Amino acid sequence: MICNAYPTLQNLYANSFLHRRVKAYQQKGLEVDIVVITTKVLKDKYYDGVHIKYMDEYQIASYLKVNDYSTVLFHFINKKMFYGIEQLEEDRRPNIVVWLHGFEAEAWHRRYYNFLENVAQLDNALERKETVFKPQREFIRDIMTRDDLNIKFIYVSQRFKELYVDPYVGVVPEKYSIIHNIIDDELFEYHKKSADDRMKICTIRPFTARNYANDITVDVIKQLSRKKYFNKLEFNIYGDGKLFNVLTNSLRQFDNVNLHKGFVKQDDIPEIHKQHGIYLGPSRHDSQGVSLGEAMSSGLVPVTNAIGGIPEFISHKETGMLASRDNVSEMVEHIDYLYKHARNFKKMSAQAAKSIKKQAGLNVVINKEIEVITNGWS
């Protein structure tokens, strides 16, 4: 596996979802060597039984020449990561699996709202358009259309492929699969919800950019404050980033809104889920919506937006509540509905957990990925 980052004791959260995959592969008897591409000279590291090597593109090329791998897996692929494959003779090239997660295969301006309040960031993006974004697009298009590579692509959702990647890259590869990111139903275990749990609402989001739509969460709470039952509700907002204080300061006036500034460890999230019934997770851009899926797995009813890949995982009024893009009033109506329909809330909670486990549970995803890795070349 060649990737751009991997967790270590010094940085537990760097692509932690890759480590869950690798450990699951190991449990299924599939051994995986990890290479993180870097320009720095770094010693090998070990994390939770996994050996991590650090190499630049030239070291990767040398490494692949002296080690015969049947398959190489790529996450967040770019041209430098792929350089080692290019240096191998065609008959010595391994099978290749490329995961497409998001930014590496979609237009930079999809997240235009991140630049609305910061002209410097927009200028920076425009400067990188010709030097970074355009070459990356051409690289993805190239490896999707070449006939000298035995390569397969994995998209994390059908909607991500059709709405983001296909229009941007302009081609569809011959071999591809739709395999969702893992929703770890063993970690995010279902706990049956009571009617009272619908009055306990949480959100766990980064506050680093506008695509996480935390401003919508704030506006939803402010509109809900006009409801007669508002003081019966309890809100817990977890997250960190440069926008946290800016966005949440106006909520300090409410005694039933609790602000928890700081990064939440993944192992601590199930306990938070256990104490709540609704997950308020608006979004402006998502290829899947993993945090929504994790909440569903725990039995929370998600309230979010029908954008990107999200509607592929949440069925409105069956496993969650979907509002149109940026629509605060609709989200308020959805929470109002859940408050007034306790029986439907409990039914949706159970259905949400059942649905996401069937669609993207740990074993479901890992078995599909291993099938592609070991037999996906006919």
Image: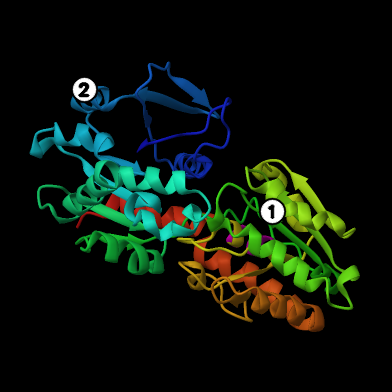
Label disc, if present, on residue 247 of the rendered structure: 1
Q: Which residues are magenta?
A: 293-298
Residue 299 shows up from this direction: no
Coordinates of residue 233 in the picture (x, y in percent) = 85, 68
Would you name the residue on which mark 2 appears? 62
Q: Is residue 330 magenta?
A: no
Coordinates of residue 236 in the picture (x, y in percent) = 78, 56
Q: Counting residues from the N terminus, which is met first, the one under dot 2 or under dot 1?
A: 2
Quadrant of the rendered structure where residue 28 is?
A: top left
Q: CA distance from mark 2 to mark 1?
A: 49 Å
- Amino acid type shown at disc 2: Ser
Residue, x 71% and y 46% (percent of image)? 245
Q: Quadrant location of the N terminus?
A: top left
- The single residue placed furthest to the front in the displayed view is 119
Secondary structure of the residue carrying tag 2 is helix
Q: Nearer the viewer, residue 104 or 29?
A: 104
Coordinates of residue 119 in the picture (x, y in percent) = 46, 48
Residue, x 84% and y 77% (percent of image)? 227
Is there a contact, CB below 8 Å, between mark 2 and mark 1?
no
242 above or below 294? above
163 above or below 362? below
